[in-house]
Image (cartoon, rainbow, N blue to C red):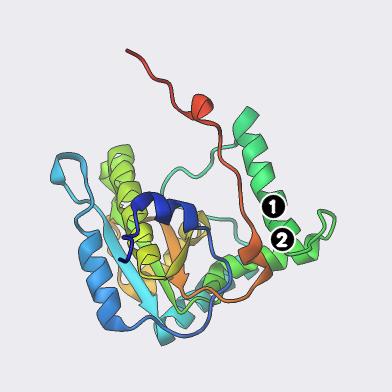
Amino acid sequence: MTMKTTIADLLSSRYSARGFKPDPVPQALLNDIFAESLKAASNCNTQPWQVYVVSGEMKDKVSNAMLAEVMSGKGPSPEFAWNVRYQGVHKDRQWGSAMALYGAMGIEREDKPARMQAMGRNWQFFGAPHGAFFAMEKYLDIMGAVDVGIYAQTLSLLLEENGIQSCMQGALGQFPAPVKNLLGIPDEQGILFGMSFGYADDHDANDCRTDRVALEDGVKFFS
């Protein structure tokens, strides 16, 4: 008897992949997964997400356009508030995540060129055959962002269920102008963040794992 994979199994197996095989996911499978993802919950059933998926030549054009913005020396120009500066325990967790990632890749903290090169791979979709941009109408503000986050998690778990790895990336929302130009995204929509996805490859970055807080630190029960 074959045991059915549970959501708990998927949460345990999933990680942020940062190295992918070039092989694309069959379009028919993508159609099925993305159709299922649209069943995600949203406030008042507003379903505010608009997802833009890039593959093949268009993915390469988008990647090159974002990299050109990065290399030009322009600072990020996100359409939503990405200016939070982590403090306290959040800063500690951010630091721990970076140390785990660069440690997995054998990059020393003092090796700034290697760290910058690793950062640049964000806008190359980490070599993935597919990328997705999560957008919504700008006026929706925080409530829309909550719903888009719920949607993105749903999509991520559906991909994992089908043996497809992914990485959520705030970096893909940092230089929206060239992306919107290439994809014809209207001005009233803003890109929140993005995701790279495909079949994971044997890459040092994929050995990175981060820890999670204990139950008593993340959840409070009252009765």
Task: Determine whether 206 is above or below 213 in the image.
Answer: below
CA–CA distance between discs 2 and 1? 6 Å
Q: Is residue 169 visible?
A: no
Tag 2 residue: 104
In depth, the one of 187 and 145 nearer the eye is: 145
The part of the image, by quadrant, that contains residue 1 is bottom left
User: Residue 122, which numbered label?
Assistant: none
As helix, strand or loop, the secondary structure at mark 2 comes to: helix
Q: Amino acid at mark 2?
A: Ala
- Secondary structure of the residue carrying numbered label 1: helix
Q: Residue furthest right?
A: 110
Location of residue 135 with respect to 181 vertically, above or below: above
The quadrant in which residue 37 appears is: bottom left
Q: Are marks 2 and 1 in contact (CB under 8 Å)?
A: yes
Q: Quadrant of residue 113?
A: bottom right
Q: Residue at 70% across / 68% down in the picture?
A: 117
> Which of 71 and 193 lies nearest the eye of the viewer?
193
Determine crowd level at label 1: few under 14, some 14-19, many 20+ residues with C-alpha closer than 10 A.
some
Q: Residues within 10 Å of mark 2 (few under 14, many from 20)?
A: some
Rendered location of residue 21, percent (x, y): 53, 81
Q: Is residue 149 left or right of residue 139?
A: right
**Looking at this rendering, what residue extends furthest in the top direction?**
223
- Residue 26 visible, this angle: yes
- Left or right of 8 on screen, residue 187: left
The residue carrying mark 1 is: 100
* Residue type pointed to by label 1: Ala
- Return the x and y of residue 75 as percentages of the image width and height: 59, 56
Q: Going 61% across and 65% down the picture, which residue do you hit? A: 206
Residue at x 26%, y 44% (from the top left corner): 139
Left/right placement of residue 160 relative to residue 94 reads: left
Residue 163 location in percent, x, y?
41, 70
